[in-house]
Image (cartoon, grey):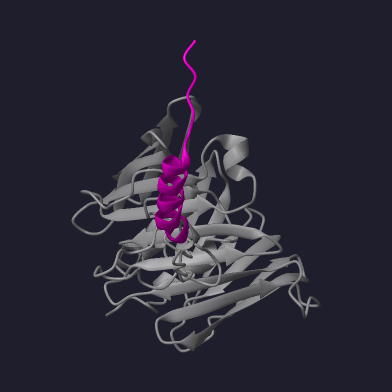
């Protein structure tokens, strides 16, 4: 077997190569700090140099490891990300996309909800409404889920909901959701004369929680809801809302743990027209009855942040 020997010439050549490459490998990498989109949430996408930066607030519709969500032909696009730790691991996704349609008068007529996954948007639910006089019917169906229906009976400043869900909603200077017997009430001010748009939740004569809006800076509002004796808000929640002139809303909700991040395009329009009241009730049914969302419906009906 032939033996190979390395003489002095090879050693000199090797040392020369090392002198060239060692400084390059020891050169310190440039570190670029990426700013947070908001104090509440960090998105996985940062605008490239030369592009318009994101508007303030959370951006759950941005591309991360899944395709970016963009508005198509729908009148309302609502991207709702469950921000609770472990949600995605438990369910395989964490974001719902609602693409809703309206008629020429601004009345919500239906739409589709999707689950946002790595493979794209997967249809999860279909919404259809029909109107006959003072009655609005909502039918919901979808792959792998049980179909359900609700009937909304419209009266003056009042809507009685029956079917799968049962409650009463009223609208005057407040948007109120009540149990059928009136023992439980959620009241959210929509009165433009009340800058803080106070809210309260009662069961019988007992005050369960109180809330109010504040406006720390232009284009931003903050809603805080807590129990009356919870001065540190250890059990309540806070909504941080960013709104733009064109009517887009972005908000993040936090309690003792993160709750959601939401992007809503076209929402302010359906909450500011002639059908704002019934649209708010339809949204409440489509998205799920939630004290985390009802303050937003009232904010929209009050016309604050509508950009008009």
Which residue does the image show at 31% across and 52% down from the upper left? 108
Q: Is residue 53 magenta?
A: no
> Is the magenta region chiefly helix, strand or loop?
helix
Please state the extent of the stretch shown in magenta in the rendering.
Answer: 1-24
Quick one: which residue is furthest to the left in this view? 104
Closer to the camera, 144 or 102?
A: 144
Q: Is residue 289 above or below residue 148?
A: below
Closer to the camera, 54 or 99?
A: 54
Q: Is residue 144 above or below residue 251?
A: above
Name the side, left or right, on which 24 lies relative to 306: right
Closer to the camera, 88 or 43?
A: 43
Q: Is residue 250 above or below residue 9?
A: below
Residue 191 at x, y = what percent? 46, 82
Task: Choose top left, top right, bottom left or bottom right for residue 223.
Answer: bottom right
Quick one: which residue is furthest to the right in this view? 229
Q: Is residue 22 magenta?
A: yes
Which residue does the image show at 41% across and 73% down from the upper left? 56
Closer to the camera, 266 or 232?
A: 232
């Amino acid at each position: 077997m032939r033996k190979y020997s390395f003489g002095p010439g090879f050693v000199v050549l090797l040392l020369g190569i090392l002198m060239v490459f060692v400084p390059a490998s020891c050169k310190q990498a440039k570190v670029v700090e990426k700013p947070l989109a908001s104090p509440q949430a960090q998105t996985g996408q940062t605008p490239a140099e030369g592009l318009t930066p994101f508007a303030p607030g959370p951006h759950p519709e941005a591309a991360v490891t899944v395709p970016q969500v963009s508005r198509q032909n729908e009148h309302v696009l609502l991207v709702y990300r469950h921000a609770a730790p472990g949600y995605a691991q438990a369910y395989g996704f964490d974001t719902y996309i609602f693409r809703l349609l309206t008629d020429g008068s601004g009345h919500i007529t239906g739409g589709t909800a999707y689950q946002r996954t790595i493979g794209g948007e997967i249809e999860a639910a279909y919404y259809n409404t029909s109107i006959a006089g003072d009655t609005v019917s909502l039918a919901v169906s979808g792959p792998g889920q049980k179909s359900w229906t609700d009937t909304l009976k419209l009266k003056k400043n009042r809507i009685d909901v029956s079917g799968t869900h049962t409650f009463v909603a009223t609208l005057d200077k407040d948007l109120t959701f009540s149990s059928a017997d009136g023992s439980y009430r959620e009241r959210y001010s929509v009165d433009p004369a009340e800058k803080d748009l106070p809210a309260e939740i009662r069961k019988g004569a007992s005050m369960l929680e109180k809330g109010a809006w504040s406006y720390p800076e232009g284009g931003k509002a903050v809603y805080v809801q807590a129990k009356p004796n919870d001065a540190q808000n250890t059990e309540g929640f806070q909504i941080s809302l960013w709104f733009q002139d064109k009517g887009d809303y972005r908000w993040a909700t936090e309690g003792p743990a993160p709750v959601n991040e939401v992007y809503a395009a076209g929402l302010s329009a359906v909450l500011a027209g002639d059908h704002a009241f019934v649209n708010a009730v339809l949204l409440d049914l489509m998205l799920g009855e939630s004290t985390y969302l009802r303050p937003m419906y009232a904010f929209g009906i009050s016309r604050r942040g509508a950009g008009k």
